[in-house]
């Protein structure tokens, strides 16, 4: 059977306990999350990637790099037009 702790031992145990408070994650703007998700969908679909490259007179590798940066959360120079519109 386990030994019962004395009142002094209980106090010592409690004073060492401190809850670990983690900082909250940075809140993500819903539009920014949708933008990253849309870029990931375009990267997964080669036909969509090709369509955006042709429509914007860019090479497919340049278009891919652009959408990779957007999907990673970056804000690259806008070489691709009208690919993400927020419905109002």
Image (cartoon, helix red, strand yellow):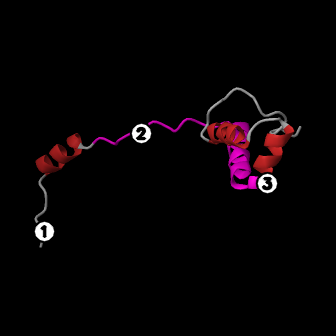
Q: Position of residue 86 (x, y in %)?
A: 83, 38
Secondary structure under the numbered disc 1 in the rendered image:
loop
Q: Where, by quadrant of the figure, is residue 34 drawn? A: top right
Point out the frontmost of discs 2 and 3. 3
Q: Check disc 1 and report the residue beneath it.
A: 2
Q: Check disc 2 and report the residue beneath it.
A: 22
Q: Considering depth in this image, is 85 or 48 the residue closer to the camera? A: 48
Could you give the CA–CA distance between mark 2 and mark 3, rounded to whole angstroms? 43 Å
Q: Position of residue 70 (x, y in %)?
A: 66, 37
Q: Is residue 87 above or below residue 45?
A: above
Of labels 2 and 1, earlier in sequence is 1
Q: Residue at x 15, y 44 (%)?
A: 12
Point out the frontmost of discs 2 and 1. 2
Of labels 3 and 1, earlier in sequence is 1
Q: Check disc 3 and report the residue beneath it.
A: 47
Identify the residue at the far bottom of this view.
Answer: 1
Mark 2 surroundings: few (<14), some (14-19) or many (≥20) residues within 10 A? few
Could you give the CA–CA distance between mark 2 and mark 1, rounded to whole angstroms? 34 Å
Q: Position of residue 53 (x, y in %)?
A: 79, 41
Mark 1 surroundings: few (<14), some (14-19) or many (≥20) residues within 10 A? few
Identify the residue at the far top of this view.
Answer: 77
Left or right: 32 in relation to 17 = right
Secondary structure under the numbered disc 3 in the rendered image:
helix
Q: Is residue 43 magenta?
A: yes
Q: Where, by quadrant of the figure, is residue 55 drawn? A: top right
Of labels 2 and 3, earlier in sequence is 2
Could you give the CA–CA distance between mark 3 and mark 1, rounded to whole angstroms? 68 Å
Mark drawn on residue 36: none
Mark 3 surroundings: few (<14), some (14-19) or many (≥20) residues within 10 A? few
Does the CB distance between marks 2 and 3 fall below 8 Å? Answer: no
Q: What span is colored magenta in the figure?
A: 18-46
């Amino acid at each position: 059977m386990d030994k019962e702790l004395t009142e002094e031992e209980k106090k010592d145990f409690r004073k060492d306990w401190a809850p670990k408070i983690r900082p909250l994650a940075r809140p993500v703007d819903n539009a920014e999350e949708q933008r990253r998700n849309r870029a990931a969908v375009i990267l997964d679909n080669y036909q969509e990637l090709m369509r955006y490259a042709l429509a914007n007179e860019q090479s497919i590798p340049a278009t891919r790099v652009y959408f990779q940066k957007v999907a990673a959360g970056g804000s690259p120079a806008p070489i691709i037009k009208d690919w993400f519109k927020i419905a109002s």
